[in-house]
Image (spheres, rainbow, N blue to C red):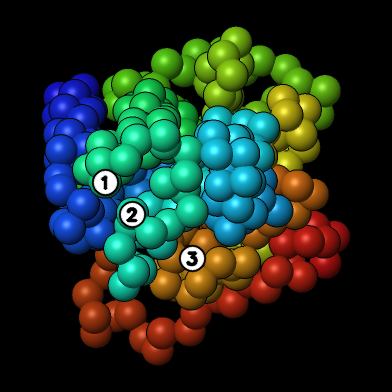
Amino acid sequence: MRYQQDLQVALRDRLRRLMTTSYTAYGHEAALVCDWISNQPGLRAILTDIAGAEPDVTVDDWEQACAQAQNLVWLTRTEGGRARLIWEWLKLVAEDEAPAHNRPMTMISGERNINTILREVTEAVVMPLFDYLGERIGSESSVLYYLERYVRRVEWFDREDLYERYSANTRQGEKVYDDHLRRFLFDQGLDMPFSQPKSASGLSDVIGELDTDDPLVCEVKVFDAGSHDKRGIASGVHQVIHYAQDYGKSAAYLVVINLSGRTLELPTDGTGKQWPPFVDIGGVRVHLIAVRALPTVSASKMGKARPVIITREDLADPDL
């Protein structure tokens, strides 16, 4: 909770700096703001979530529409789409060698003083992004940040204990990891019920905040390269897609508990460096979070590393 509060305060301070900077330093300050936001895992996770929101609306079209109307015009229909558009605009300001006050967006102001114009633009155009980020910190939209922490929690601290409990009853072993994940997310501040609400497609392992505008749909699957194989992961992908479609969500999460002792190479529709990998199927972005959950052994006992490669085709057809 303290992390969330500190981040919200820091977010407001960055906005204040941008609003009070002079026009000669606006581009530089925008670059500092963008760098800072990009380096905050919680904020980066939110921006990753909305990266595909209303992709047909471009910054160029938006700026031209605002300049033509000489007023602020929103071409987006959702909060996520609007936030994505503002973020892309702010990054362009940060990267552009031309002064910020020469951008078409400044036409929305009727002022003559350049500093006043940029202050008005910041308040009207940029502030909604900061409002969005501030509201989403600690909510399901920042779930990627918590899942990243969960991966570290299991890999660094809980491997042996969880695997021992899993091995005691492998038929219901998946529930060990499912319960552990749910408890972790609940402790992080996600208001998640322990009951499993039923959707038209069945039961999702983790469904939180279903009575809000921003529910979380997350499935847990065990992978051991044996009885729990690639088909189980593909089945999990299709399950979360169905659950997300039932609840009108564009994002879902599949946590893969890797007990194979081998590295999982998962496909992605994003860049190779982006974590976590994701696939866009059926209008839903499925984030794929792999957790190395098998207790570690000494290097001398490990043998040759042979990664398990899972292709997009493997995930697209669960019957393969």
Q: Secondary structure at mark 1?
A: helix
- The spot of residue 90 in percent (x, y) is 38, 52
> Which of 297/13 is in front?
13
Which residue is at 46% across, 34% downward?
Answer: 141
- The spot of residue 268 in percent (x, y) is 59, 67
Which residue is at 62% across, 66% downward?
Answer: 269
Q: Which residue is mark 1?
A: 114
- The spot of residue 47 in percent (x, y) is 44, 47
Amino acid carrying mark 3 in the image: Ser
Amino acid carrying mark 2 in the image: His
Q: Which residue is mark 3?
A: 260
Q: Residues within 10 Å of mark 2 (few under 14, many from 20)?
A: some
Amino acid carrying mark 1 in the image: Ile
Q: Is residue 177 visible?
A: no
Which is in the foreground here, disc 3 or disc 1? 1
Do the numbered discs 2 and 1 sit on residues whose CB atoms are within 8 Å? yes
Q: Which residue is mark 2?
A: 101
